[in-house]
Amino acid sequence: MGVPQISNRSEQSSNRSEPARYRGRSARNRTESRSPSDRPAWSRRGILAALGAVPAVALTGCSGSADASEGSGASATAAASTKAKARTATPTVSVTPADGTKKADFTSPVEVTVADGTLSSVKVTGNDGSTLAGSFNDARTRWTSTRNPYSGAKYTVTATPRGAGAQTTSFVTKSPGETFVGYFTPEANSTSGVGMPVSLNFTRAVKDRAAVEKAITVTAEPAVEVVGHWFSDTRLDFRPEEYWAAGTKVTLSLRLKDVEGTDGVYGTQSKDVTFHIGRRQVSTVDLAKKTMTVERDGSTLATYPVSGGDADHTTWSGIMVVSERFKQTRMESSTVGLGDEYDIPDVPHAQRLTTSGTFIHGNYWASTSVFGSSNTSHGCIGLHDAKGADDSSVPGYKFYASSMLGDVVIVKNSGERTVDPANGLNGWNLSWADWKAGSAL
């Protein structure tokens, strides 16, 4: 069974450790020189033990040192332990805002993280059925929403770690203490003339104009560049460089909800509003000639005799836009700072051109001969009309019937300076460069 071979190994090993006086002798002589009692007694168990000891010595020799051998063993043990923990660790999901929060902050994004694992999917659903989009980091250990949650809403977060079951939490965001809205012109689904800007008036003064303007976009079909212009901290208008093209579809997109317009004051609107541009009508009033020429889609529709403001009450010059229309309305001089000079309860076919009180309207109380020959008004532009506003044969009736909100009326040769662009919807009096300079973006 090879016992003699193992015995020879043992003898050779002993030969290496013997004193030099024995070297050179044969194994037989060395053995014979010993007494029987000095010879090793090799049992079968001893032989097997010796066989087992040889590999251990070989491993030590390969490692380079005893310490290195022990270190390798420790590293292997630690690695095995880590792998074992990885196999047995349960992924732990954390959500911000925390589960059950009743007044969560709405000015920060939702964040989901996982420890001891990776995220397979995350879904954040609002109580209105909408979802909150987001993105993972490269390691898929963190998910962050692309926008903040809305105020005053309940959200449910369903996070699924890879290889584990879904975990669900929920929270409710707080409502803002103070809010603002923007009242817009024109009305939704309306049709306006080519001069109609998109005008917003805010219920609270806006401090962070850039944030508010960024949350509002106006787009046109066919496409054209549309830019905002701040007339004050409560008014923002949008227009293209030139009048809108006839037939344009205009969309106002408001994303003001939870936008901080000023310290602690947040917007509430998130909606899209669409309106349309009708035919192109531009009327030019020449107060030197005392006539008004109405052009429709590039052709002359009509020419009417008019009367403008007298020398003491000159009419504004410049580009003006029809912002209000009344079949009949009351006009009092006291409302425009002229004392008690007039009070007419039933002015027919009145169309507002400025906030300060300039109208183009019918006039039944002046002689017919005035129109086309004299400027006698307190600043308005008058056309011959009939009391009661029902006579379709007179110029006042005809012009009113042909007009709509947003139509352009240009006044020249009035003897007055150009109207302030903020006085009504009259931003067309600004050059395109000046208009764009009024944007906060």
Image (cartoon, rainbow, N blue to C red):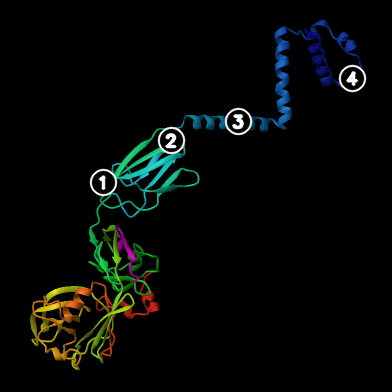
Compared to residue 85, the image places residue 269 above or below, namely below
Name which residue type carries label 2.
Pro
Q: Is residue 306 magenta?
A: no
Image spot of residue 262 (x, y percent): 29, 65
Residue that appears at 16% across and 88% down: 377
| Residue depth check, mark 3 versus mark 1: number of the one nearer the observer | 1
Q: Which residues are magenta?
A: 244-262
Return the residue at label 4: 23
Instruction: Give the tally of numbered discs.
Output: 4
* Mark 1 crowd level (few <14, some 14–19, many ≥20, 10 Å Cα): some
* Mark pair 4, 3: CA separation: 44 Å
| Residue depth check, mark 4 versus mark 2: number of the one nearer the observer | 2
Residue that appears at 42% across and 40% down: 121
Query: Mark number for residue 102?
Result: 1
On the rendered structure, is 29 left or right of 253? right
Disc 2, disc 1: CB below 8 Å? no
* Mark pair 1, 4: CA separation: 93 Å
Return the disc, 4 or 2, that comes first in the chain's sequence: 4
Image spot of residue 407 (x, y percent): 26, 75
| Residue depth check, mark 1 versus mark 4: number of the one nearer the observer | 1
> Which secondary structure lies at badge 1?
loop
> Which secondary structure lies at badge 3?
helix
Query: Mark number for residue 76?
Result: 3
Query: Mark number for residue 91?
Result: 2
